[in-house]
Amino acid sequence: MNWPLSPQEKRILIASTRDATLADVASALDITLGSLKNYVNGLLQRHGVHTRSELVEQVLRTHAPGDPLIV
């Protein structure tokens, strides 16, 4: 599976590993909750998962060590 992520998508993915609420993640990344929801929904749809936890698990399961996650 191809996992290139933009820098902002990578920040969202990393913040999501902390089990934070969407409001917490948006605040930490200094973006609006609406923008965060758009990013998250796009990532979930693009990768065929339903939750941020599933997305993190799928990335960790399919990402080859040494392959960059950022495009």
Image (spheres, grey):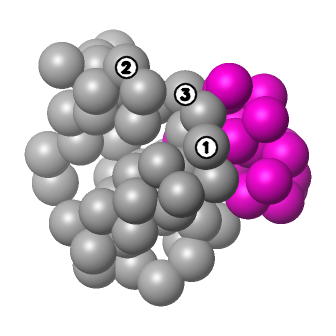
Amino acid at pointer 1: Thr
How far apart marks 1 and 2 lie (CA) works out to 17 Å
**Helix, strand or loop under label 1:** loop
Query: Can the viewer see residue 49 in this picture?
Result: yes
Query: Can the viewer see residue 58 in this picture?
Result: no
Query: In the rendered structure, which disc, 3 or 1, sits on the residue that comes first in sequence?
Result: 3
How far apart marks 3 and 2 lie (CA) works out to 6 Å
**Helix, strand or loop under label 2:** helix
Query: In the rendered structure, which disc, 1 or 2, sits on the residue that comes first in sequence?
Result: 2
30 horizontally vs 40: left or right: right
- Asked if labels 2 and 3 touch by Cβ distance under 8 angstroms, the answer is yes
Tell me the residue at 21%/66% (across/down).
Answer: 46
As drawn, 20 above or below 12: below
Amino acid at pointer 2: Pro
Reading the image, the residue beneath label 2 is 7
CA neighbours of label 3 inside 10 A, class few (<14), some (14 to 19), many (20+): some
Mark 3 or 1: in front is: 1
Quarter occupied by the C terminus: top left
Residue span colored magenta: 13-30
- Asked if labels 1 and 3 touch by Cβ distance under 8 angstroms, the answer is no
Reading the image, the residue beneath label 1 is 32
Viewer-side residue, 55 vs 64: 55
Reading the image, the residue beneath label 3 is 11
| Residue 21: in magenta span | yes
Mark 1 or 2: in front is: 1
